[in-house]
Image (spheres, rainbow, N blue to C red):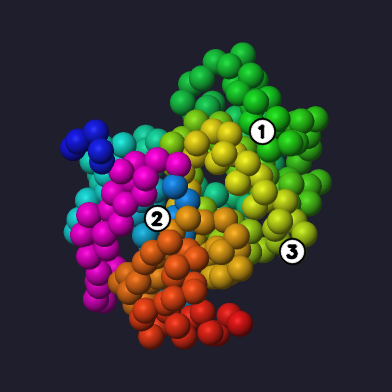
């Protein structure tokens, strides 16, 4: 693939669980530093797409390319990307340090380097001093910051986030969104964001893809898509959020 290839490319991606196609020949690109959102109702295929990119679901047809490399058959732990989930995917029996360091420990990174990189991650998410706290001692916003720190410590080029702020109240949402935007500015991160919340999407993303029944029905820059939707489904989706 050429030097002009996007950071992420999904090529005719399909998923069939044995009862018919859930995802139908999905094609999308994400450029370096871009913030792309998949928008649509529950069951439209957003999370299935995310899970196939992360390697948590097998691909029925098509290819997943990352940084010019075909990673379609690559195990999840070997993919240079990280996922932030809605449900604070933390080990409850581990403290903050242990949660953030876990991926490095599995890869055999030396303890001194683990400590250095955890401290850097905590600084980035503004949780310095929280190393020994357990997840049960943290607020929802703090737990989500730990999840983001866990993703950042692997130094990925791409972070995929599945409803990463939907479980938080409005004030904490704003703090997490500010953190996501700051990290993007400072470190050139790319994001694939999955959300139901049209207001959140409008605030932070560059481009939207609207999904319906496993297909992309419309896409474009966020302001253009919100102000001048072309497809009837997109118009109905936006109208329902007003």
Given residues 122 and 201, the one toward you in this image is 201
Question: Looking at the picture, how far across and down is residue 47, in whole percent?
Answer: 43, 63
Magenta highlight range: 6-33
- Which quadrant, please, contains the N terminus? top left
Give SS at disc 1.
helix
Q: Are marks 3 and 1 in contact (CB under 8 Å)?
A: no
What residue sits right under mark 2 in the picture?
A: 51
Q: Are marks 2 and 1 in contact (CB under 8 Å)?
A: no
What residue sits right under mark 1 in the picture?
A: 124
Question: Looking at the picture, how far across and down is residue 70, in whole percent?
Answer: 23, 41
Q: Residue at x 78, y 51 (%)?
A: 139
What residue sits right under mark 3 in the picture?
A: 170
Total labels drawn: 3
Q: Residue at x 44, y 47 (%)?
A: 34
- Which quadrant, please, contains the C terminus? bottom right
Q: Is residue 29 magenta?
A: yes
């Amino acid at each position: 693939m050429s030097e002009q290839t996007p950071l992420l490319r999904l090529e005719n991606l399909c998923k069939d669980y044995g009862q018919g196609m859930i995802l139908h020949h999905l094609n999308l690109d994400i450029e370096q530093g871009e913030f792309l959102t998949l928008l649509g109702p529950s069951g439209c295929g957003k999370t299935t797409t995310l899970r196939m990119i992360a390697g948590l679901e097998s691909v029925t047809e098509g290819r997943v390319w990352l940084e010019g490399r075909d990673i379609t058959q690559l195990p999840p732990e070997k993919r240079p990307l990280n996922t932030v989930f809605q449900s604070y995917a933390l080990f409850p029996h581990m403290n903050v340090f242990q949660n953030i360091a876990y991926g490095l420990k599995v890869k055999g990174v030396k303890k001194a380097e683990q400590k250095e990189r955890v401290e850097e991650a905590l600084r980035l998410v503004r949780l310095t001093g929280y190393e020994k706290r357990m997840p049960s001692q943290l607020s929802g916003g703090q737990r989500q910051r730990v999840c983001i720190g866990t993703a950042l410590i692997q130094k990925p080029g791409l972070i995929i986030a599945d409803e990463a702020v939907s479980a938080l109240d409005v004030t904490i949402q704003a703090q997490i969104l500010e953190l996501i935007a700051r990290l993007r500015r400072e470190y050139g991160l790319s994001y694939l964001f999955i959300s139901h919340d049209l207001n959140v999407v409008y605030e932070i993303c560059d481009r939207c893809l609207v999904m319906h029944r496993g297909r992309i029905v419309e896409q474009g820059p966020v302001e253009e898509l919100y102000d001048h939707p072309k497809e009837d489904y997109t118009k109905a989706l936006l109208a329902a959020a007003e």
